[in-house]
Image (cartoon, rainbow, N blue to C red):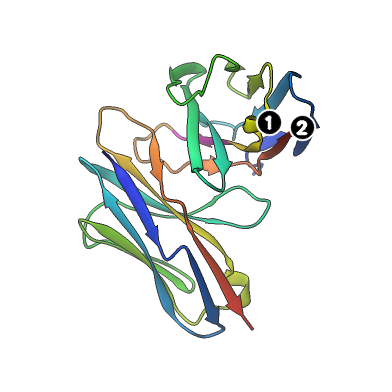
């Protein structure tokens, strides 16, 4: 079975540019999560969706960050305008409906803002 | 405040040298504790879920155990391919909460 698919794998762009990260969750999963990982802070949850509806976006750092899930098989995380401190690895994960379901991760997008 | 702490931060073992990684947690109510393995350049890979004190799960050379305050990941006779960062995460009982509280991980290196 295909796992969570993220694109691009690497993104290098200049400060001020718009960045769009993409995620395709595992088919049949009901929840989708966006995380950011840095050495200093580890994995931080940014936002999560249930059946395409955002449930908790309290981890989104600023209004520069936005996420959408237009259908069950696609989600985007957008940063506009980007800043050097946004440089990190961004992961998408998905899980089944049951309350203790494990989250399954993609291989991430390594984002560098110059 | 809910918190998860992993120790040690880094561990270097010789092949065949068994050891344990620790994940201590302080949460209002535990719904589940998750162990993941992360290889460089990859996303975390799910290993185990533990639900209640006294529970144990095993997979190959790994065994995870859970008490009311901490979890251990025991690695028996490790091999170089067990080298990775091991992450622990906790899900609390708050409502229908799906958030996981993550530790910073233990970086394990197994030398041949």
- Whole-percent x and y of residue B105? 47, 56
Region rendered in magenta: A92-96
Rendering quarter of residue A113: top right
Residue A19 - label:
none
Position of A41 relative to B94 (above/below): below
> Please, what secondary structure does the residue beneath circle 1 have?
helix
The residue under the point 58% across, 21% down is A72
Which is nearer the N-term, disc 1 or disc 2? 1
Q: Chain of mark 2?
A: A
**Which class describes the residues within 10 Å of circle 2: few (<14), some (14-19), or many (20+)?**
some
Position of A95 relative to B63 (above/below): above
Quadrant including the C terminus of chain A? top right
Position of A97 relative to B61 (above/below): above
Judge left or right: residue A94 versus residue B70: right
Residue A49 appears in the figure:
yes
Quadrant including the N terminus of chain A? top right
> Please, what secondary structure does the residue beneath circle 2 have?
loop
Number of labelled discs?
2
Q: Residue A94 in magenta?
A: yes
The residue under the point 63% across, 41% down is A106
Front residue (pair B104, B44): B104
Residue placed under numbered mark 1 in the picture: A84
Residue A114 - label:
2
Residues at circles 1 and 2 in contact by the CB criterion of under 8 Å: yes
Disc 1 versus disc 2: distance between alpha carbons?
Answer: 6 Å
């Amino acid at each position: 079975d295909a796992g969570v698919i993220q694109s691009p794998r690497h993104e290098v762009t200049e400060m001020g540019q718009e960045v769009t990260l993409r995620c395709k969750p595992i088919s049949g999963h009901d929840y989708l999560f966006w995380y950011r990982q840095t050495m200093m802070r580890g994995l931080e949850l940014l936002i999560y969706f249930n059946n395409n509806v955002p449930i908790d976006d309290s981890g989104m750092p600023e209004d520069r960050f936005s996420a959408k899930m237009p259908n069950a098989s696609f989600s985007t995380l957008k940063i506009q305008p980007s800043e050097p401190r946004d440089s990190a690895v961004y992961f998408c994960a998905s899980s089944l409906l049951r309350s203790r379901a494990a989250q399954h991760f993609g291989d991430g997008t390594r984002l560098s803002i110059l | 405040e809910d918190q998860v702490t992993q120790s040690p931060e880094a561990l270097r073992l010789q092949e065949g040298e068994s050891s344990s990684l620790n994940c201590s947690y302080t949460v209002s109510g535990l719904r589940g504790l998750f162990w993941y393995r992360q290889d460089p350049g990859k996303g975390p890979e799910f290993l185990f879920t533990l639900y209640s004190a006294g529970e144990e799960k095993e997979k190959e050379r790994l065994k995870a155990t859970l008490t009311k305050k901490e979890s251990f990941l025991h690695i028996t006779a490790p091999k170089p391919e067990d080298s990775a960062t091991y992450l622990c995460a906790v899900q609390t009982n708050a409502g229908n909460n799906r958030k996981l509280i993550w530790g910073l991980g233990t970086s394990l290196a197994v030398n041949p």
